[in-house]
Image: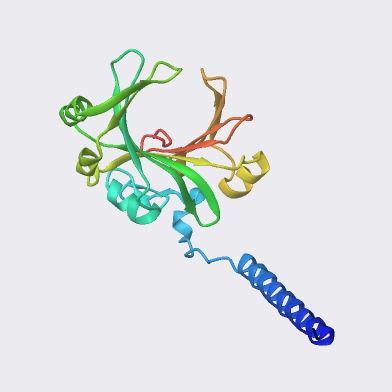
């Protein structure tokens, strides 16, 4: 057996292995560094740029309250949406909401809850068509709907929006982006509620968790 040829063959195999290993490592590093670009977010869609237009309609997160629909929201934030009905512990007040577990506004990662506007009769019908009921620790009943029924609510207008950022907002960051709140108060939930009337925004400050940004046409300065 030719020992010299065997040694050369072994060295060649090792060289090829290291070339492949180095090339694979460099390619992986390059793929990690090159992140896909998200579509540029319109300035008016950013949470701190909500506003009332000249006819009193509230624009927030790219939607117009009492005009834009769940379908419009899905066009902006994707199809991964849940729709459920909520019944308060006293069984007196029902609401139907759409929930996006994960969505992005530019670099902001958050969850989004949208209240859908239905007549009392439509809401009662939706409740009767529920698939299952879960009772939350607060006593609120959460009713899941069949997928075949959810599509019926895609074209109903939205009456309020709640944005739940994944990252905690510091007071400094809030003031820098949103400005000074028009009114602050501690409510029965023992949390601070900050009101920004020109933005139709109520911000709920929770030191132990992320803030909740609630947009509603009912949030405005009294005349």
Q: Residue at x 49, y 48 (%)?
A: 47
Measured as percent of width and height from the top left, residue 131 is found at: 25, 28
Measured as percent of width and height from the top left, residue 57 is found at: 33, 47
Q: Is residue 160 left or right of residue 179?
A: left
Q: Is residue 120 above or below residue 20?
A: above
Q: Which of the image's four quarters has the C terminus?
A: top left
Measured as percent of width and height from the top left, residue 82 is found at: 35, 39
Q: Is residue 191 above or below residue 32?
A: above
Measured as percent of width and height from the top left, residue 191 is found at: 57, 24
In this rendered view, identify the residue nearer to me: 16 or 222.
Answer: 16
Asked if residue 20 shows in the view, the reply is: yes
Asked if residue 54 shows in the view, the reply is: no
In this rendered view, identify the residue nearer to me: 29 or 140.
Answer: 29
- Using the rendered view, name the quadrant where residue 166 is placed: top right
- Using the rendered view, name the quadrant where residue 152 is placed: top left
- Using the rendered view, name the quadrant where residue 126 is placed: top left
């Amino acid at each position: 057996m030719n020992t010299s040829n065997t040694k050369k063959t072994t060295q060649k195999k090792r060289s090829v292995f290291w070339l492949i290993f180095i090339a694979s490592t460099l390619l992986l590093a390059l793929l990690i560094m090159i992140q896909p670009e998200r579509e540029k977010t319109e300035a008016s869609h950013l949470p701190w740029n909500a506003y009332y237009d000249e006819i009193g309609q509230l624009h927030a997160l790219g939607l117009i309250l009492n005009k834009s629909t769940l379908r419009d929201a899905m066009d902006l934030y994707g199809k991964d949406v849940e729709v459920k009905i909520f019944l308060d512990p006293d069984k007196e007040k029902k609401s139907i909401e759409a929930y996006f577990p994960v969505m992005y506004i530019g670099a902001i990662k958050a969850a989004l809850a949208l209240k859908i506007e239905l007549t009392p009769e439509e809401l009662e019908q939706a409740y009767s068509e529920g698939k299952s009921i879960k009772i939350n620790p607060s006593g609120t009943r959460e009713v899941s709907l069949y997928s075949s029924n959810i599509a019926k609510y895609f074209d109903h207008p939205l009456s309020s929006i709640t944005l739940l950022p994944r990252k905690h907002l510091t007071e400094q960051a809030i003031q820098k982006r949103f400005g000074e709140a028009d009114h602050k108060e501690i409510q029965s939930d023992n949390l601070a509620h900050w009101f920004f009337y020109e933005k139709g925004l109520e911000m709920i400050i929770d030191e132990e968790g992320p803030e909740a940004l609630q947009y509603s046409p009912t949030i405005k300065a009294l005349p």
